[in-house]
Image (cartoon, helix red, strand yellow):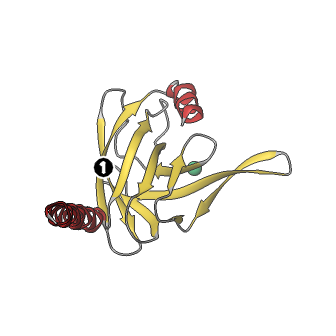
Amino acid sequence: MNVRIFAKAHQTRISAALVAAVISLFSLAVHADNHVKVENGYIRATIPGTNISSAYMVITNHSMNVKELIGATSNISPRIEIHEHQMSEGMMKMRQRESIVINMHDAVTLQPSGLHLMIFELNKPLKVGDNVELTLQFKDGEQLPISLPVESIKRKKKAKHAHNHH
Ligand SMILES: [Cu+2]
């Protein structure tokens, strides 16, 4: 009799802990909603005599929705486009894209020879060590401000290496 009562009390305590765990998981999920994370970002230093650059980064969608990147804005340039390098008839060609779709819990990598943000008409040269503020624009209206370090073209190899380990 005593044993049975003890067992029942114990069981009640477990289910209360379980409910608390479920509640905290649920609030974590709500908190993560609309959360897009940008990592490993950088922007290329300008080559003397040019006024263009490109930006690279890994964008991860931790939100509960499909996110669609439709562009970026910055006070360093009036014109930033989404570009993609593609092999076509044995030639590497660059074309503009309307957007990049990032599925739920998925990530896209903007990298040399792939997807990138192409920055035209820079109003000043970008030097290694500078930081550039960009705002990513999403189709659902979200605006995500990011800060990217300016890095030399040599970063290319390093980024590829890091990606292989991912
Ligand atoms: Cu481009």
Residue extending farthest to the bottom is 140
Q: Is mark 1 within 8 Å of ligand 1?
A: no
Residue at 39%, 69% in the rendered image: 64
Tell me where residue 95 appears, x and y as whole percent: 65, 58
The part of the image, by quadrant, that contains residue 21 is bottom left
Residue at 53%, 66% in the rendered image: 101
Of the 4 image quadrants, the one containing the C terminus is top right
- State whether residue 125 is above or below residue 140: above
- State whether residue 98 is above or below residue 54: below
Check disc 1 and give the amino acid type: Ile
Residue at 15%, 66% in the rendered image: 5
The part of the image, by quadrant, that contains residue 11 is bottom left
Residue extending farthest to the right is 89
Q: Nearer the viewer, residue 116 or 120?
A: 116
Residue 59 seen in the current view: yes
Give the secondary structure at mark 1.
strand
- State whether residue 54 is above or below residue 80: above
Tell me where residue 26 appears, x and y as whole percent: 27, 68
Q: How many marks?
A: 1
Q: Taking 94 as reference, is 156 left or right? A: left
The part of the image, by quadrant, that contains residue 97 is bottom right
Q: Residues within 10 Å of mark 1 (few under 14, many from 20)?
A: some
Of the 4 image quadrants, the one containing the N terminus is bottom left
Residue extending farthest to the front is 1
Tell me where residue 138 appears, x and y as whole percent: 39, 68
Q: Nearer the viewer, residue 21 or 50?
A: 21
- State whether residue 155 is above or below residue 82: above
Residue 120 seen in the current view: no
Residue at 36%, 52% in the rendered image: 37
Q: Which residue is mark 1?
A: 146
Q: Taking 9 as reference, is 38 left or right? A: right
Q: Taking 157 as reference, is 1 left or right? A: left
